[in-house]
């Protein structure tokens, strides 16, 4: 099952890749990952960068805690982290431990890759990486 560790690895854009596509160093620190869509229809924002409630509080490949936001429906497993618990679909959830996120994604049958990455602006980087890897491994 494609989970949060896969998502974080695949959505990490290196500084070099970002700058090559016209990005700035300041903007690089605040890159937004795509909204996660799960197979049961649940979706949520899962972010980590210099401007959100995460640990470490910078844009990196892996985190111990992340900021979640605006789930498509109330999710009990993260409610204790809600900034506004009375509005569970209209709030952010700060410093949610990565293990809680893993369990939440499993509960919702994993990440739907096709739907999650459909409109993400850095999708081409992922495709280029896959193409290079296939060439290295001699896979057609």
Image: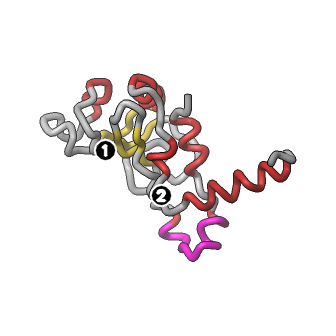
SS at circle 1: strand
Q: Quick one: label 2 or label 1, which is nearer the N terminus?
A: 1
Question: In the figure, 106 relative to 28: above or below?
Answer: above
Q: Is residue 74 magenta?
A: no
- The dominant secondary structure in magenta is helix
Judged by depth in the image, the label closer to the viewer, 2 or 1, is 2
Kindly state the secondary structure of the residue where label 2 is placed: loop
In this rendering, the answer to whether 107 lies above or below 5 is above
- The residue tagged 2 is 120
- Relative to 79, 46 lies left or right: right
Q: Is residue 73 above or below residue 19?
A: above
Q: CA distance from mark 2 to mark 1?
A: 17 Å
Q: How many marks?
A: 2
Residue drawn at (59%, 67%) of the image: 18
Judge whether 104 appears above or below 43 on screen.
above
Residue at mark 1: 69
Give the residue at x 45% y 25%: 106
Magenta-tinted stretch? 17-27
Quadrant of the image occupied by residue 95:
top left
Return the residue nearer the eye: 112 or 96.
112
Residue 111 x %, y %? 47, 36
Left of 129 or right of it: where is 13? left
């Amino acid at each position: 099952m494609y989970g949060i560790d896969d998502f974080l690895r695949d959505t990490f854009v290196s500084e070099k890749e970002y700058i090559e596509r016209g990005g700035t160093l300041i903007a690089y620190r605040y890159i937004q990952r795509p909204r996660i869509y799960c197979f049961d229809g649940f979706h949520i924002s899962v972010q980590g960068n210099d401007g959100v409630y995460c640990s470490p509080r910078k844009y990196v490949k892996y985190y111990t805690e992340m900021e979640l936001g605006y789930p498509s429906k109330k999710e009990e497993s993260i409610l204790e982290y809600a900034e506004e618990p009375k509005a569970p679909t209209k709030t952010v959830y700060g410093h949610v431990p990565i293990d809680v996120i893993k369990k939440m994604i499993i509960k919702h049958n994993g990440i739907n890759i096709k739907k999650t990455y459909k409109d993400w602006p850095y999708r081409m980087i992922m495709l280029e990486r896959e193409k290079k890897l296939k060439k290295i491994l001699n896979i057609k």
